[in-house]
Image (cartoon, rainbow, N blue to C red):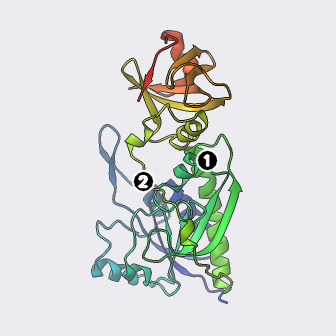
Amino acid sequence: MTETPLRIIFMGTPDFAAISLAALLQGPDQVVAVVTQPDRPKGRGKKLSPPPVKVLAQDKSIPVLQPAKIRTEAFRDELLAFHPDLVVVTAYGRILPPALLALAPLGCINVHGSLLPRHRGAAPIQWAIMNGDTEVGVTLIQMDEGMDTGDILLTKAIPADPEETAGSLFVKLAELGSSALLEAIIRLKAGALLPTPQDHSLATAAPMLKKEDGNIDWNLSAEKLHCLIRGLDPWPAASCRIDGQRFRLFSPEVIHKDSPAAPGTLVRAERDGLLIATGHNMLLVREIQPEGKKRMPASAFLCGHSLQTGTVLAP
């Protein structure tokens, strides 16, 4: 057991990671350096924008490294110069090579946004919702060379809200992950953090999402589409075409009643939303985003536009 503050290198990029970094900065240990992805073009003007982790680190006067390549001796030596005891990784966005995994005496701990071995990969939160998981959570692992395959150090689970979106669950799991990280470090320093191998036979994949993943297949059941739309909210968003115009769909509700209309047919368009036939039961969509416009209640769109019953919502 040690009470000496650890020297920690933190590696992460998006808001999800910034919440873990903020928690570390409130703790007794010292974040000696932050590694994050390079600035990326953002918005219509394609102006370079720093990752949220970089913004926080610079605000706290912590050295920031943004290497284009991480598999070089020069980068490894640059990190070694900080004399780290531990490396903490949260949504960094790259698989670490063996040289970096062995960089610190206590190795690398990763905060992952799923209950491993379920949902290994870049988009675990979205896939948990899309798959209709009834329980969600975070897992801390001792990193190895695989994609989220390391031994489990700590797991925190919560019930899944049936109306949860990927956006709202990101916030919940980021907070849960940050508190789990602080607990894990306390237990690590006390010698009470015991690794448990994952059951690889139970592993599922959570690959990075693409815009095409939002294309709706109305032959699916309303229950599956309910999960799909929530899991893709806010990005890339589930979408379809109405009279040739692309619409993104949000705020779904399953209506437990079948329609004689073919899947994808607009059964009703009223103030409560768009009622659509599916492969089983019907789906009520309360919010939409017409192409080139802001997200809005369906009722707001219908105030100035007419959608006819029987219109087919195309993929």
Left or right of residue 155: residue 250: left
- Single out the mark in the foreground, 1 or 2: 1
Q: Please name the residue that numbered disc 1 is placed on.
A: 132
According to the picture, the residue beneath numbered tag 2 turns out to be 208
Expressed as whole percent of the image width and height from the top left, the position of residue 234 reads 50, 40
The Cα–Cα distance between marks 1 and 2, rounded to whole angstroms, is 18 Å
Q: Taking 178 as reference, is 5 above or below it?
A: below
Question: Which residue occupies the extreme front position in the image?
Answer: 260
Residue 27 appears in the figure: no
Viewer-proximal residue among 63 and 123:
123
Label 2 neighbour load within 10 Å: few <14, some 14-19, many 20+ = few
Question: Which of 267/112 is in front?
Answer: 267
**Pointers 1 and 2 in contact (CB under 8 A)?**
no
Looking at the rendered image, the quarter that the N terminus falls into is bottom right
In the rendered image, the residue lying farthest to the bottom is 1
Q: Amino acid at mark 1?
A: Gly
Q: Is residue 160 left or right of residue 269?
A: right
Say which label, 1 or 2, has the lower sequence index. Answer: 1
Say above or below: 104 vs 223.
Answer: below
Q: Residues within 10 Å of mark 1 (few under 14, many from 20)?
A: some
- Residue for point 63% across, 57% down: 175
Mark yes or no: residue 309 visible.
Answer: yes
Decide: is 37 above or below 182.
Answer: above
Say what secondary structure mark 2 lies in: loop
Please tell me which residue is depicted at 47% across the width and 15% down the height of the picture.
311
Return the x and y of residue 83 as percentages of the image width and height: 45, 85
